[in-house]
Image: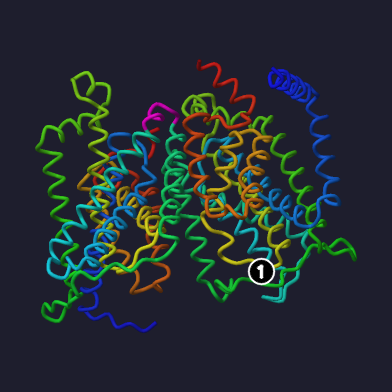
Amino acid sequence: MIKQILAERLSRRWQGILRMPKWLQFVLITGFVAVLPPFIGNYWTHVLAYIGIYVMLGVGINVVVGFAGLLDLGYVAFYAIGAYSYAFLASPKFGIHIPFWMMIPACAALASLGGALLGIPVLRMRGDYLAIVTLGFGEIIRILINNLDALTNGPKGLLRIDPPTIGSFTFTTPTHFYYLILGGCLLSIFFTSRLNNSRIGRAWIAMREDQDAAALMGIDILKYKLLAFAIGASFAGVGGTIFAAKQGSIFPDDFSVMVSVNVICLIIIGGLGSIPGVIIGAIILIGIPEVLRAAAMYRMLAFGLLLILMMIFRPMGIFPSARRKLELKKED
Amino acid sequence: MSVTFTPELIIEQIINGLTIGAIYALIALGYTLVYGVLLMINFAHGEIFMFGSFAGYFVLAWFFQSGFATNHAFLSIVMAFAGGILVSSALGVLVERLAYRPLRNAPRLSPLICAIGVSIFLQNIMMLFVEAKILMYPDVFPEKAVEIGPVSISNFQILIITVSIVMMAGLYVFVKKTNTGKAMRAVAEDKDTAALMGINVDRIITTTFVAGSSLAAVAGVMVGMYYSQISHMMGFIPGIKAFTAAVLGGIGNMPGAMLGGYILGVAEALGVLILPAQYKDVIAFSFLVLILIFRPRGIMGEVVAERT
């Protein structure tokens, strides 16, 4: 009895929150996240910052997988391109020190160029072929990083990468990076939600649902696929740059296939195409394992199981996008 | 790098390539068979191969401990193959039953993602089971070089190439000559019509998984003997490469998968003569991208790259 009342109250309160205007929810959540660091200490700030990087990656790959419906398993390649580009041009390795803020757009551009270059040959394929080829591409990039010693120092990695600065202020503590990453997340979320509601976003969704019908309606399929790839990649480029700046040193192992798989998993578990889903997914997949260090051994096992169960029992994810929900209902 | 390309070296590299190509071919057949009936890429096939290899290891290790292997080397190997086949087939059937069957009519992305989940799950189960150790495969018989003129081949290589050819010939006869094989081809052609003709589609799909998993298990045991060490990660790269081989030959096409495996193996082995060995995997993946761009239907396959 008590249980029932509690559940009812909880659900009513929850519905109240959900009924608030979208912008108010957004402001409340952002405000809450923004005041956190002083209260939670360095370790938790670090964990949240790490989750934030994955939110950026998730938002980016959401454009490719969620909006455009292209399964990209080589997303880590663009993350690596961003991180290594910044490390080349802002570390003692080549004695070049280009400021962080100039490198952000440059790395975004480089990563999206990489996305376009990969996209041109492979985008004629559909579904699972695309998945395997992009997986292969991610591996090629990792093998190159591991072996081009003259450029990347191989497994020894690139060290002493410049931190970002504003005037005489230098980003050093986890809290500084926390706010940097929070800013990055907000911008990414802003961009993608604008994209989703634009002409381009609608073209992507039309294409995802039925490529042939979309083509008949005059959507240039290849152009829009390429656009999705390039735009999605640019988020990874920025994420990689921030990651390199935050860590101060990067190694080939930071860019294994598992990064791509994690990012894909988090958007699937959160709900394809939905932005709150990305955040929930990142907290579940990146945050919880980080906290449950003791269970690290079982983390990947649980991942795999979660993927299987999600696909069978709740393919739309925890937080399905509104459009997806509509689509799924219509089918009933 | 200063390598002199003597004809002997090239011939030896080709034989090395055929050996590893035989392995790719055996695994590739599993991809092709499953793709034929379910139109899905069984991403977990590399892990089924890995499980076969481990099962063979445990059988051999047990025989060594009990001293049985010292007198009955040949029988031990046969038992290792049998153990591998048993475990892999059971696993293949289980995975199909629990993970793929509920998704048979789902959108195409779902089974693929599910298969990735299965792959991660199986890899980590094995990691926990063997505590992430790299295991040394027991030496059942010593590796010997057989000299044929100026070229030397190891007895393992002869074993691998022979066994792979026998297995593939067996599979070919099974698919082309038996009733079950005929039913398999019918299911690959059109599931609904096949069902109307009185074929038990579920049973045929199970049979397909058994066949594919058995070939992978044989490949796994042979890889263990050839490289003499195995780990829970061993399925990933051969899995992708075998998939490449299947695509190269034209996915869904059995002779194509065999040919694709050998071609990929030889191309890799010869590529290593020109490029440093670390780039071996790059060769294979570049191969995959190039085939899919220029000849998506493979050497002897049908058009599939545009099929949804």
On the image, the x and y values in percent for residue A25 come to 80, 30
Above/below status of B149 relative to B260 = below
Above/below status of B99 relative to B80 = above
Above/below status of B275 relative to B59 = below
Residue type of the residue flagged with mark 1: Phe
* Element type where label 1 sits in the image: helix
Say few, some or many: other residues with alpha carbon within 10 Å of mark 1 (under 14 / 14 to 19 / 20 or more): some
In magenta, the rendered stretch is: B101-107
Instruction: Give whichever of A25, B263 is nearer the camera.
Output: A25
Please report the residue visible at 64 percent of the width from the left and 25 percent of the height from the top. Answer: A322
What is the chain identity of the residue bearing mark 1? A
Above/below status of B197 relative to B211 = above
Please report the residue visible at 22 percent of the width from the left and 24 percent of the height from the top. Answer: B194
On the image, the x and y values in percent for residue B275 come to 39, 72
Residue that numbered label 1 is attached to: A88
Q: Is residue A257 left or right of residue A108?
A: left
Instruction: Give whichever of A122, B232 is nearer the camera.
Output: B232
Please report the residue visible at 63 percent of the width from the left and 30 percent of the height from the top. Answer: A319
Residue A227 is at least partly visible in this image: no
**B143 part of magenta stretch:** no
Residue A183 is at least partly visible in this image: yes
Q: Is residue B276 left or right of residue A263?
A: left
Instruction: Give whichever of A144, B168 is nearer the camera.
Output: B168
